Amino acid sequence: MQHDFKTDSAYTRRRFLQSLGSAATLSAAGMLVDPKSALAAPSESDLRIAEVKTYIMEDAIFVRVTTDSGVSGWGECDAGSHYVMDAFIHSEHARHVLGKDPFDNQPLYDQMFYRAHDFGPGGALSNSISGIDIAIWDIKARILDVPLYRLLGGLYRQKLPIYGSYGTGRWENLDKKQAVAQAVKFVRDGFRTVKCRMQIREDHLNPVEDRTIEYVDAIQKEIGGDAELFVDINNGYSAARAIQIGRVLQDKYGHRFYEEPCSDQNHIETARVVEALDLGIIAGEKEYTLFQLDEMITYANPDFLNPDVIKAGGITTMRKIAALSQMRQKPIIFHNTRPTISTAATLQLAASAPLVGPFFEYPDADRFVEQIGVVRQYLDVRDGHITVPDSPGLGIDIDEEKVIARSSEVNVSDLS
Ligand SMILES: [Mg+2]
């Protein structure tokens, strides 16, 4: 459904507002601005977005947005469906941002979101917007020569705990011994918290051969009290099974957190688990818009929100989610499975969000050595912590030549 700003109710509201004061006064206060006319009006700035480029790599899709002044910013989309992201960006989004001022990031976001709303609102639409939006915020901060967090309200914290995150099912399919070894490796690398993804999922609901307790038992025996462990079920349990397993995790193993025990499509099941257990329930990695997160809080009522900057529409949405989390008193445990642009953007958000959980997610860097190699000076990650850089923008410098060398395809949309 496309937004029609000229509905009867809008006109009624406008007439009502006009009855309260002059249109000029209201317009100056920003109350009567139609997003479409705001976009049509030429910006006072001469700065224009001149090029949008995508780089398709085996393990990532990066986006580079460049202005006519030569300043560029980098963004990233979740790499689940590279070519879907790429097609979305070049066939839909690029035409809405080319020739526009990057400082109009909110109307640009609205254009990208509502013009392709029929294909969304979540999933590929928000995911593909993320890459462009993150790059646009990187540009804004670079032009102003400040770290991005300065544009997001400033710094609450400069050194943030991160947890080591890894999967045991689907792609990785780790056996018990390998699962233990990966957890031990994180602890040896200095991580104080480790998350093991069981990756059961809805299509294999409540498996008869359930590995969760078996794996937890083996990992706990090995890491002992050196680090905290929790599991991510990835939507794989009914509420009844989630409560049964959750009780063992909290009572026998002293766990404090429990991620996505039930389907993200069924908030009522999650709400039952939240009610029944003392564990902190984490949910929301598949909620891609502010509206979806708000609805999830209302019906599932998890203890922690789990949005992802490269899926949920970039910085423009995530800064609003940060406000929502403060308003609804739900700390954010940021979802972050990629080590470069995603981690840099998450770090800026985690540093500047008012209400965050005790840590955020970080992948096994050894799985991404080549991808990390495209960053000129990588982020300061040590002893289970990551430090906010004080350089402009996202705080990392990407070597485009190295990105191109790793890309199977580079696609460009420009003003020509
Ligand atoms: Mg998860």
Image (cartoon, helix red, strand yellow):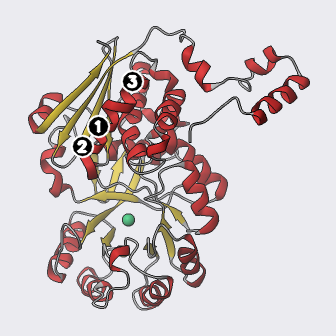
- Residue to which mark 3 is pinned: 95
Q: Position of residue 372 (x, y in %)?
A: 18, 45
- Residue to which mark 2 is pinned: 83
Q: Does the residue labelled 3 lie within 8 Å of ligand 1?
A: no
Q: Nearer the viewer, residue 209 or 155?
A: 209
Q: Where is residue 34 in the image (x, y as percent from the top left)?
A: 65, 24
Q: Is residue 393 among the parts visible in the rendering? A: no
Please indicate whether residue 131 sits to the left or right of residue 275 in the image: left
Please indicate whether residue 141 sits to the left or right of residue 1 in the image: left
Which quarter of the figure is the C terminus placed in?
Answer: top left
Residue type (three-letter) at the residue carrying disc 1: Ala
Q: Which mark is residue 87?
A: 1
Q: What's the distance in space between the residues labelled 3 and 2, CA to CA? A: 18 Å
Q: What's the distance in space between the residues labelled 3 and 1, CA to CA? A: 12 Å
In this rendering, is residue 276 above or below 299? below
- Precedes in sequence: disc 3 or disc 1: 1
Residue visible at 43% across and 59% down?
285
Residue visible at 15% across and 76% down?
178
Query: Is disc 1 in contact with disc 2, using a CB cutoff of under 8 Å?
Result: yes
Query: Is disc 3 in contact with disc 1, using a CB cutoff of under 8 Å?
Result: no
Outermost residue to the left = 405
In this rendering, is residue 166 above or below 58? below
